[in-house]
């Protein structure tokens, strides 16, 4: 289930917490970029445990030619 997009006020709070002091033009760019970030975060698969790091789940034999 997708999350609700962050509001401008929520993004302003996040920017203040990060110590950013942005003029209106830069803040508008941040809001636009944050929308794209939210879309990317929605595409990340979350059904993996913390132990499933790429080094632990990569099986090279899956990519070798079968004889």
Image (cartoon, rainbow, N blue to C red):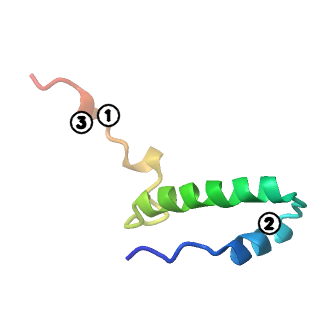
User: Where residue 41 sits in the image (x, y, percent)?
Assistant: 50, 60
Q: Nearer the viewer, mark 2 or mark 3?
A: 2
Mark 3 vs mark 1, CA separation in Å: 5 Å
**Which x, y percent locates residue 9?**
73, 77
Marks 2 and 3, the one that precedes in the sequence:
2
Q: Secondary structure at mark 3?
A: helix
Q: CA distance from mark 2 to mark 1?
A: 42 Å
Q: In the rendered view, does 62 fall on the left or right side of 34? A: left
Regarding mark 2 in the picture, which secondary structure is present there? helix
* Residue at image location 37% in from the left, 67% down from the top: 47
* Residue 9, numbered circle: none
- In contact (CB < 8 Å): disc 2 and disc 1: no
* Residue 32 placement (x, y as % from top left): 63, 56
- Which residue is disc 3 drawn over? 62
- The residue indicated by pointer 1 is 60
Q: Residues within 10 Å of mark 2 (few under 14, many from 20)?
A: some
Residue visible at 87% across and 60% down? 20
Q: Is residue 65 above or below residue 35?
A: above
Q: Work out whether mark 2 precedes mark 1 in sequence or the reverse, and give the earlier one.
A: 2
The residue identified by callout 2 is 15
For residue 3, above or below residue 51:
below
Q: Secondary structure at mark 1?
A: helix
Residue toward you, 35 or 47: 35
Q: Are marks 3 and 1 in contact (CB under 8 Å)?
A: yes
Q: Residue at x 24, y 36 (%)?
A: 62
- The image position of residue 25, as x and y in percent, is 79, 54
**For residue 44, which quarter of the picture?**
bottom left
Determine crowd level at label 3: few under 14, some 14-19, many 20+ residues with C-alpha closer than 10 A: few
């Amino acid at each position: 289930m997708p999350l609700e997009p962050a509001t401008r006020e929520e993004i302003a709070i996040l920017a203040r917490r990060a110590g950013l002091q942005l003029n209106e033009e830069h803040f508008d760019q941040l809001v636009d970029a944050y929308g794209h970030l939210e879309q990317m975060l929605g595409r990340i698969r979350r059904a993996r445990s913390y132990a499933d790091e790429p080094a632990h789940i990569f099986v090279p034999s899956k990519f070798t030619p079968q004889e």
